[in-house]
Image (cartoon, rainbow, N blue to C red):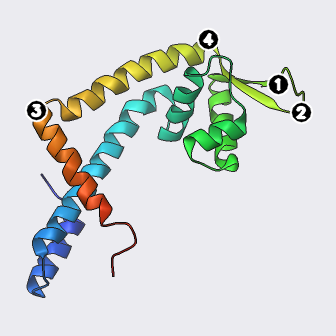
Amino acid sequence: MKLEQKYLALIQEAQQRKMPDVDGIRLCFQTLSLAAGIDRDCATLLAPHSLSEGRFVLLFLLDAAPGGLAPNALAERAGVTRATVTGLLDGLEREELIERHADATDRRALCIRLTRKGKRVAKVTFEQHGRWIASLYGNLSAPERKQLTTLLEKVAGNLAGTAP
């Protein structure tokens, strides 16, 4: 795996300073480089559809709720603030992928639904995204996937605020 130049420089400096566990530092930077690469490829995949990751998540959630969802429910399910959801919805509305409707039971509330175009874009992007994710892990056997999951969970357990 090719590491970004900044990480290579930091590893070299760690080696010169004879810091403990340079291999751990390298693993951390490999993980960060992989995550950045996944983010870049995901953004590239979504860009032709005028979607960011946040917009994609809302599209996914709305596709799963044919009756629509209130903005606060979208915010909660997406794990973002209401203000963030408002901005994401504004972008989806500009692209004519969603419509805001008055809620049938409470005229003060909004219900967000996908438009026909939104449903088409959702279908295409979900299929494309699913194939892309499958390709990321396609060369791993079932035992390797299980092992990777175990290792990632083990490292994630170290993030529980116990680090010095």
Is there any visible trace of residue 140 in the rendered image?
no
Answer left or right for 99 relative to 121.
right
Amino acid at circle 4: Arg
Q: Residue at x 51, y 30 (%)?
A: 50
- Which element carries disc 2, helix, strand or loop? loop
Residue type highlighted by circle 2: Arg
Q: Earlier in the sequence, mark 2 or mark 4?
A: 2
Q: Is residue 9 above or below residue 54?
A: below
Name the image quarter holding residue 140.
top left
Q: Quadrant of the C terminus?
A: bottom left
Q: Which residue is mark 4?
A: 116
Instruction: Give the number of the mark in front: 3 or 2.
Output: 3
Q: Are marks 3 and 2 in contact (CB under 8 Å)?
A: no
Viewer-nearest of discs 3 and 4: 3
Amino acid identity at mark 1? Asp
Question: On the picture, is 93 further left or further right than 2?
Answer: right
Residues tagged 3 and 1 counted as in contact (Cβ below 8 A): no
The residue to which callout 1 is attached is: 103
| Neighbourhood count class around disc 3 (C-alpha, 10 Å): few under 14, some 14–19, many 20 upward | few
